[in-house]
Image (spheres, coloured by chain):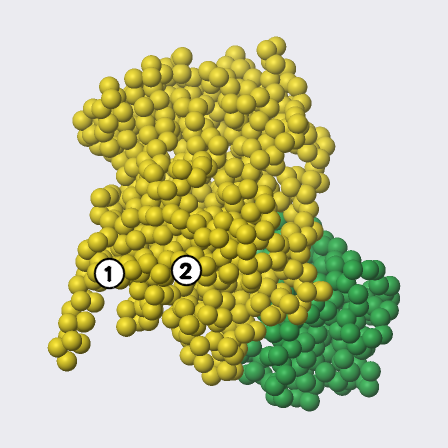
Chain colours: A green, B yellow
Amino acid sequence: MTGLERRQIKGAACVLMTFLWLMPIAAWADDSEVAIFSPGQAIELDGDEGLALFELVIDGTAPSMNVARLSHRKSTPPPHDEPVSRKRSSVVRLDQAPTEWVVLRLREGWYQITEVDAPFFELPYRLDTSDDPLWRFCVVPGKTAYAGRLFIAKERRTDFVEVTLESRIAFQFETLQAHRDDWFGDANLIYGRAIPDPYVDTLLENWR
Amino acid sequence: MIRTLALVALWTASVGANAFTADEFFTHPDVSAAVLSPDGRQVAVIADVENEPAIDVIDTATGARRRLADQITLGASEASPLSLVWIDNETVAVTLVELRAGVENLLDTKGTRRLVMLTEGTNEASTRVASVRTSGRMVGALPESPDEFLYARSGRVSRVYRVRASKLNDDALPRTKLTRIDGGQFVASNAVASVDGFALHWFEGEGGQPHSVLHLGESGALLSVFRDDGKTDKLYEWSADTMDESADDPVFFPLARTRTEDTYFAVDLSDEERRTIFRVNYRTEEVDEIYRAGEYPIFGVTLAPGASDAIGVQELRDGQVTTVYIDEQGVRYQDEADRDGTQQRIRIDRSPDGQHELFYLEDHNAPGRFEVVHNRQSRLVGSEHPNLNARLTSRLETATVDVDGLTVPYLLTLPGREHPQPWPLVVIPHGGPVDVYDDAGFEPTVQFFAANGYAVLRVNFRGSGGFGDTYRDAGKREYGAGMLRDINAAVAAVAARPDINADRIVVAGFSYGGYAASMLGIRHPETYRAAVTLMGVSDLGLFVAQSDWPERAREWGEDYIGDPWTDAASLAEQSPDMLLDQLRVPLMIVHGGKDEVVDIEHAYRLKVRLDQLGKDYEWQIYPETGHNLGDLEDRRDLHRRVLAFLDRYARL
């Protein structure tokens, strides 16, 4: 592929992305696909639904992740050191993300990111995260739960794809504060990761 | 009024006395590696010319230095010299590596290295430059055969060829259709060894002949040793799925052969930081850790030619390849007696007749120098930082303090006597912290502060390396407790000295040292007047809950720091970002935007919380810097700012 062809494809992708931004993406999603929205979008939530907030810093062709609801009904995180049964997983097509910040509309409960697909042109890559408790997040009815920053990049100089899910909430705190009203409205921001984080608990105590 | 003026005058005098600015102190190394010609009459060095590499030759009898090739001659706009080897008394082979493309990729199969032969003329313009056009890499020189060297090509079958430097095409001459690439020397009749599969690395034996080879097979990688009949015996094998940089188990990748049978210097590919050299016996699978670099990843090890007691460890510093010389035991100072500031003197090369020897010298207050000894006469032939030679007047003292039944060693660097006493004290806890230690080698940051009138205290607190497994393991889960007690006990001992101003103590550290500095500032405002955290951890729970840590790293974190799930509360109690309401002293926060070891989130956690609490702090982010002190420009700026910050509170 020539550089010109690559630029043309990139340009076409930009047009497509703009188109996607304007369309109700959920209309295309089948049963096993989770709809993906920008945080500022007007999203109607059912009584048992909430939002999971992700920051996406992703690269590659058609990255996606699979999420599965855990059979854990308590509000406290599921046990980190024993298996937790889960429902069938659904796919989140990250290349359809309208912005760097996205929310997923999901039923209340705990979720496991079971797999991240990060294919690069010459390097198909799949990370199995199904047993890793660091890849869990919660959804609380009527709230927006911060689930972390998903990072996908091919490391320079190597054939290694880096995939991480980390808390970057302090790094982005200014952004979150700046969008307090237009992003979250009545859906208060809460800490949504399974790994305990007393700092973020303290930080968000006075969010409202 | 007169008293105030006198104090100001005294302060000005103390700062002015032999003080260094950061710009003056921190420079690119003038000479970063040196090798002796076979006859001992010349030393070839990798030099720096206005931040660009060059190759110089120094006459060992007269000290006269002349340029063999600059970067343009080398054709190295994107490459840096990795190593030098004399082919004979006239020709030097320079291996260049493309820094952007492949220097850190040890499983490099893309040919990012290039070999250039430089043959001396009467002046720089007459140096003959001949590049090897055939893709591959140099195996070694052949000491018994002037003009000849061994060069390896990799492919489905990999071969080593005997090549004559004089038959390579001169880069300055135009090539025609009749020109045979590399003099047509890569032919079967010149092959001296071969192996099936793509060869990643060839290891020299005595006399320069191939001894063993690391190569790819059908199911993975193999380390094979040559027999006398030219065939190979498998010494070790890695399956394809284990030869992976994300592997959970260590993957010891051999970089150089030691003089001991079946034993190689190696790095662990699964260690993302790649800052440790191991000695690995691939037959018995015995592994010893022998050297750990401070800030930079290691990507190469070379044995000093002609000498059996030194190796060079190649680190990538500030975009340049830098060789760190260590003895074959891997430590710069082998025992307690040597830690007291005795000059490091390592023989790094020797002429075959033994008449000339090349030494690398380093002191706590003098950066590396290269010295040739001939007929018991020694001559300095190059220095890493000649601007600092004989200008640093600090003294080093070592002592111990007893804490919790442990004997805790520390190093105290005292400024020269031209700086008026009592001196302010800056405490610099080391990073790591486990298995890392401070030694009596040259440490630029320490000497920078000493040259600016500070006494500098470095404590090898529990958990530090180099003092045995028991001492290292005493650091388990003591990040915010025992380690800090050790530092405080040493500070108390030093503060009792009459030449130290106990009311002017500040603390600054990098990585774990930054964590320790924050914690000491928060918990002991009665001792420390200010604290600086450089790329420091601020939240222990966040640090041990990294999703890209392999299982082995997570187990290590749980063992040495704490379990992020079950110990969350106790980790929070030992985390600076959760204790900032208690902060009473000025805090400076410095971080790199590309830090992949301690994420920049750690710095922002401090910032956001301090903003919430309405507390002042100093804030400096270097967007392009990783988990180190940055390139030369950032490093200078960082030291300038940190010194100015500390001066505000330590020189009141």
Residue B350 drawn at (x, y percent): 35, 22
Tag 2: amino acid? Val
The image quadrant that residue B327 belongs to is top left
Q: Nearer the viewer, residue B119 or B603?
A: B603
The label on residue B491 is 2
Quadrant occupied by the C terminus of chain A: bottom right
| Residue drawn 32% across the image and 48% down it | B396
Q: Nearer the viewer, residue B376 or B2?
A: B2
Q: CA distance from mark 1 to mark 2?
A: 17 Å
Q: Label 2 neighbourhood size at 10 Å, few (<14), some (14-19), many (20+)?
A: many
Local SS, label 1: loop
| Residue drawn 28% across the image and 69% down it | B651
Residue that label 1 marks: B421
Tell me, yes or no, if residue B370 can be seen here.
Answer: yes
| Residue B633 as seen in the image, left or right of residue B196 | left
| Residue drawn 46% across the image and 15% down it | B207
The numbered mark, 1 or 2, whose residue comes first in the sequence reads 1
The label on residue B143 is none
Residue B364 drawn at (x, y percent): 33, 45
Extreme residue toward the top, this view? B229
Local SS, label 2: helix
Tag 1: amino acid? Gln
Q: Nearer the viewer, residue A140 or B457?
A: B457
